[in-house]
Image: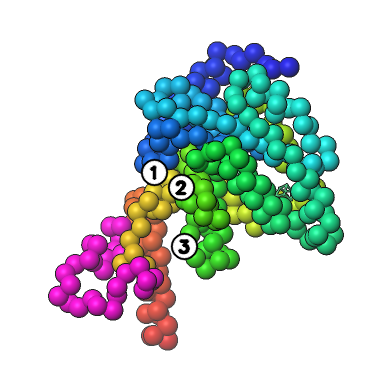
């Protein structure tokens, strides 16, 4: 049974809703995610992110100056124990058009993948194909996925750690089969706020471990690392995300993005010149600066003593 919210919780919910709506609206506008006449297929997994995305998109649609429609889609992969009544009941209650697609990818994956090996990559490939097909059947012009800022940051880190690429999850792109436009309206939203919002909204969340597979361990480790940074160094994740929107190819090393070969001294100062190592680019507190200075002098002293002895 749903809990009656206290005044304080209602206030928090309102505040979170306002913030999420603002950030989602901003992302939609920055990337031109939704246009007049669009039919948006909202992928609903039953997790906190997709419930929040659907909610916020419905609210934005009600207030938008343009006309677009929303159809929620859930893929029932026939995992044991999947509570198939939950989403139809919820979607009927909020009065949104929806489609539940039933495909037993669970048994295909169990059949094809050796016991003990991770099933996620085949499972998500199958899921993607089914969702693309469904988008076509439903005449959807865009597919909306519920990934948020922290998913994008974790992907950026994972690609650097294991893929040798400076690459994240796109806020808007053409799908890998070249047939659909995929959008991530929650691109600017923080996971912590979505989590809090979903809890207060009391969505009927469906657990994501029904298949019994291990979640992607490296992604989990990376997420934990980011969360730890967020606790210890407030503002770091915000800065990292801003960095993704502020790429300076001349100060990286990709020769396909920037023509380093033709630089001569007559090229003029490019993007602020070669000052990337200067202190002014990194804001330290007075205490940090003092400590860095103290370390420097102590190292110098050690070197001098070594030279004398
Ligand atoms: S956790 Fe289970 S349902 Fe999710 S992608 Fe992996 S195998 Fe598929």
**How packed is label 1: few (under 14 Cα within 10 Å), some, or many (20 or more)?**
some
Q: Quadrant of residue 62?
A: top left
Tell me the residue that label 2 is attached to: 172
Give the mark nearest the N terminus, 1 or 2.
Answer: 1
- Relative to 242, residue 87 above or below: above
Distance of label 1 from label 3 (alpha carbons): 20 Å
Q: Residue at point 69% right, 57% down?
A: 121
SS at mark 2?
strand
Q: Residue at point 78% right, 54% down?
A: 109
Tell me the residue that label 3 is attached to: 166
**How packed is label 3: few (under 14 Cα within 10 Å), some, or many (20 or more)?**
some
Q: Nearer the viewer, mark 1 or mark 3?
A: 1
Q: Nearer the viewer, residue 219 or 72?
A: 72
Left/right of residue 1 with respect to residue 8 in the rendered view? right
Q: Position of residue 138 (x, y in %)?
A: 59, 37
Q: Are marks 1 and 2 in contact (CB under 8 Å)?
A: yes
Distance of label 1 from label 2 (alpha carbons): 7 Å
Which span of residues is magenta-colored? Answer: 253-281
Give the mark nearest the N terminus, 1 or 3.
Answer: 1
């Amino acid at each position: 049974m749903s809990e009656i919210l206290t005044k304080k919780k209602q206030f928090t919910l309102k505040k979170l809703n306002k913030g999420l709506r603002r950030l989602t609206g901003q992302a939609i506008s920055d990337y031109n995610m939704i246009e007049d006449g669009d039919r948006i297929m909202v992928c609903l997994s039953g997790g906190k992110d997709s419930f929040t995305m659907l909610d916020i998109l419905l609210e934005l649609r009600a207030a938008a100056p343009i006309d677009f429609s929303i159809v929620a889609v859930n893929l029932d992969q026939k995992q044991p124990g999947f509570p198939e009544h939950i989403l139809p009941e919820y979607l009927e209650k909020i009065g949104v058009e929806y489609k539940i697609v039933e495909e037993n990818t669970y048994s295909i994956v169990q059949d094809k993948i050796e016991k003990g090996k991770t099933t996620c990559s085949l499972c998500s490939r199958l899921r993607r194909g089914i969702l693309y097909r469904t988008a076509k059947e439903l005449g959807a012009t865009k597919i909306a996925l519920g990934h948020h800022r922290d998913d994008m940051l974790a992907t950026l880190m994972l690609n650097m750690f294991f893929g040798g690429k400076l690459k994240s999850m796109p806020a808007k792109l053409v799908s890998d089969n070249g047939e659909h436009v995929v959008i991530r309206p929650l691109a600017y939203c923080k996971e912590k706020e979505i989590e809090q919002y979903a809890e207060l909204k009391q969505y009927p969340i469906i657990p994501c471990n029904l298949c019994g597979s291990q979640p992607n361990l490296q992604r989990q480790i990376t997420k934990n690392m980011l969360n730890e940074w967020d606790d210890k160094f407030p503002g770091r994740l915000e800065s990292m995300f801003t960095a993704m929107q502020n790429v300076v190819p001349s100060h990286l090393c990709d020769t396909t993005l920037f023509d380093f070969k033709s630089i001569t001294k007559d090229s003029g100062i490019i993007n602020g010149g070669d000052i990337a190592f200067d202190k002014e680019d990194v804001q330290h507190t007075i205490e940090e600066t003092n400590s860095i200075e103290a370390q420097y002098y102590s190292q110098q002293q050690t070197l001098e003593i070594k030279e004398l002895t």
